[in-house]
Amino acid sequence: MAYELWPKQMTNEIRRLQGPDDLESWELFPSNLQEMVDWADVYEDREKKDKSRNRILIYKKVEDAESSTIYPVAIRMHGILEEFRVERFGNWTGKLQDARRAVQNITVSSGGHQEPWDATITSLNLACEYVSRRVRVPMQQMKNKNIYLQRNAFHKRDVPRKSNEPVLSIDDDPEGKFLCLQESWDVVEPLRVAELCANSKKNPIDSILLTAGDFVEVGAELDFVINRNRSAQTTLKCFLTCTYMVRLMPAVHVQNSQLVSIEKILNDAQVLTKSLCRTKRGQRASIH
């Protein structure tokens, strides 16, 4: 998605990950509404209970695909990693009542590179506009700011699990936190996290090695939701579900190569200063 608009060093890393072969036509994201009409379709999943979330953007033509199979559109986006919680249980508090809200999440930013970022936001809004026209519901545009992606940490089971044997191994759940949930919930597979190596291969890494400031590729699926607000106005929103993440450049290399704008560095410094000031005020207050 708009990868050629990033600075040369970043674009080279994206190309290394992509490999030497050119992308097929169905893998290239459309640049306008006419191309989108030819490229994608909107599928209604009649088996989905939640009718506000039963529209799926799918490819019209996939090379060597089975005719009876639908393929949801998947995108790749790039940016500077900001906040993230991608461990197995995400932001789950450990309490049974909070399982439904538990998510893994990723926030990526432009790093001050406005041209590729604007193109990314424009592409996402193009997809939303297409679905909006198809379902005849006004869309809510995505703003030109940081992009937030998430995925549910757990899925509710249709039928309670009868066995009391731990579902997860000690390595996967050393503290046995999931035991209180496993009767009614399934835990999702770990988010795939990898690093692009010098030989252009992807090596899986532990998410603990990720750092804010890394230049990353994030895979995502588009989740369209028909939402009604308190004023009874109905709009279509596009949410992004993260599917994988690959670190293309560590934060230290991004900084040493001056691939983050001075403006972003100054903004981050201001945020850090304000945070430290709040901490100091809180410490003085607690002492007195």
Image (cartoon, rainbow, N blue to C red):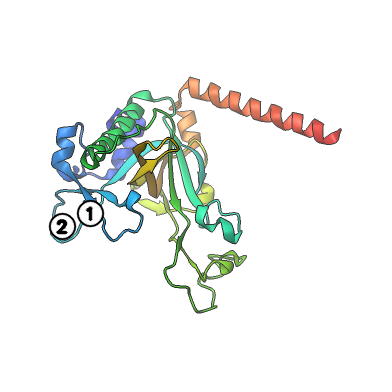
Q: Does residue 83 appear in this view?
A: yes
At x 49% / y 30%, what residue is drawn?
A: 255
For the residues labelled 1 and 2, the Cα–Cα distance comes to 9 Å
Q: Residue 143 carries which label?
A: none
Q: Which residue occupies the foreground of this view, 176 or 143? A: 143
Residue 38: give x, y in percent of width and height. Answer: 13, 40
- In the rendered structure, which amino acid carries the disc numbered 1? Tyr
Taking the view exactly as shown, the residue that stands out farthest to the front is 232
Q: In this view, does 56 lie above or below 114?
A: below
Answer with the quarter of the image where residue 134 lies. top left
Q: What element carries label 1?
A: loop
In this view of the protein, which residue sits in the foreground, 210 or 34? 34
Q: Is residue 75 left or right of residue 150?
A: left
Q: In this rendering, which labeled residue sits more in front, label 1 or label 2?
A: 1
- Answer whether labels 1 and 2 touch (C-beta < 8 Å): yes
**Looking at the image, is mark 1 or mark 2 earlier in the sequence?**
2
Which residue is disc 1 drawn over?
A: 71
What residue appears at the point 53 percent right and 70 percent down from the top-left corner?
169
Q: In this view, does 225 lie above or below 160?
A: above
As drawn, the label of residue 65 is 2
